[in-house]
Amino acid sequence: MILDKPLDQITEADLQVLKDNAVSEGRTLDYKLELTKNSDDAKKEFLFDVTSFANAAGGYMIFGIGEQNGVPVEVTGLTAANPDAEILRLVNMMRDTIQPRLRPVGTQIVRLANGHWCLVMHIPRSWSRPHAVLNKKYLVFYSRNSAGKYPLDVPEVRDAFLSAGSEAERIRNFRAARIGDIVAGQTPVPVPETAKIVFHLVPIGAFGGDTIDASQLDGLQRRMHEMNIWGPYKRHNFDGLLFSTLMHPVAPGQVALNYAQVYRNGIIEAVDSFNLSNGGGPSAINGPFLEDRLLPKLPPLLQVIEVLEIEPPVLLFVTFLGVSGCTISATPGHFIDYQPYPIDRDALLMPDVLIETLADDPRQIMKPVFDVLWNSGGKSGSPSYNELGEWTRQQ
């Protein structure tokens, strides 16, 4: 990560470090002395820059920094009187001209001591790439390398579409294969033969060839006390780093109720095994209790992604195993006006959720998962949210 902190924490000092260290432009960084003007040529140049980041590894555009030969020479800042209006102008420009539409990009206004301001714009690598700029009647595709942006020729455009499709297929195939392995008992530590909830967090580009080295895993092992919720015992293994509730070596007959495996390509697999009914009987899932149990489990996994400096977006896959025949009930005394029906399959593969920023509220991230869980039991969605999709139930 070029700017090694959350976007909303970037300050003038961070921008000054880029200048002092002569951090040059490249595949993930671009400096702009001024804001994009409203001329057709300026708009096209800006949109080509944005799509080149989205179609490659993602990155940052910083407005208000002068450069020479790609090396920053001065943090001068911008003088426009209304930064919010300028950001809205750029966002509208992207919305109206880029196809398919980009998901919202991150923006941060950085105030300077001289009274001016800089704009830091983060464009994540896109899950729906390749993106094109509509230039008159034509679609123009750009990508990036260490020298900056460049236009894609016809074979490269074809390859971009094919690689995006194959990457999505590889991610979904990985999930399917791992679910099959978990059902078959192929897990890094033994787990009980009970119902399970499985999290898979897959960074976009996990199969691009980059790997996490041992020193990063050592740092993760030292820092991630929050991962104790997945197990206090940590150790290296063939796949990367394992957190579990079971000390190694494992005695015969011992099982781990929870584990989280961090793979060397940044993927995280976390399994939670427990009695879904919480005392409500072997075939009754206490829906609100289950939601409350799962919500605290997600933030530590997202923090692993942050500590490892993996750029979002990240795909979240949640799977419920061993739930065939179960009904979904409410907390005693909590009235829900629906007739529960038994779940008709043993494995519920929830739809994938795209996490665009690691600071997103876990309750909003998990809403599609909870809704489909309740759908499987006969209700139109989770009763924990109102008609606007806002969490309203007291945890």
Image (cartoon, grey):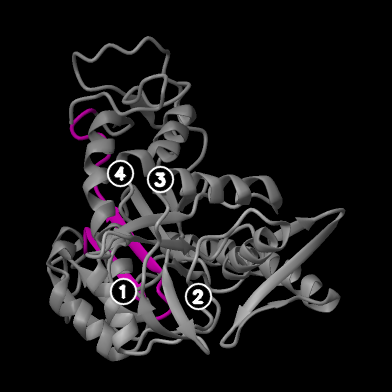
Q: Which residue position is annotated with label 4?
A: 361
Dot 1 or dot 2, earlier in sequence:
1
Q: Which residue position is annotated with label 1?
A: 15
**Residue 3: in magenta span:** no
Contact, mark 2 vs mark 3 (Cβ under 8 Å): no
Name the kind of residue labelled 3 in the image. Answer: Asn
**Which residue is painted at 31% across and 74% down in the image?**
15
**Which residue is painted at 30% across and 44% down in the image?**
361
Dot 1 or dot 4, earlier in sequence:
1
Camera-near label (1 vs 4) is 1
**Which residue is painted at 81% across and 59% down in the image?**
139
Question: Which corner quadrant holds the N terminus?
Answer: bottom left
Q: Give the range drawn in magenta.
A: 256-280
- Judge by depth and name the residue closer to the eye, 190 or 381: 381
- Judge by depth and name the residue closer to the eye, 36 or 225: 36
Q: Which residue position is annotated with label 3?
A: 82
Question: Which corner quadrant holds the C terminus?
Answer: top left
- Check disc 1 and report its element: helix, strand or loop: helix
Dot 2 or dot 3, earlier in sequence:
2
Camera-near label (3 vs 4) is 3
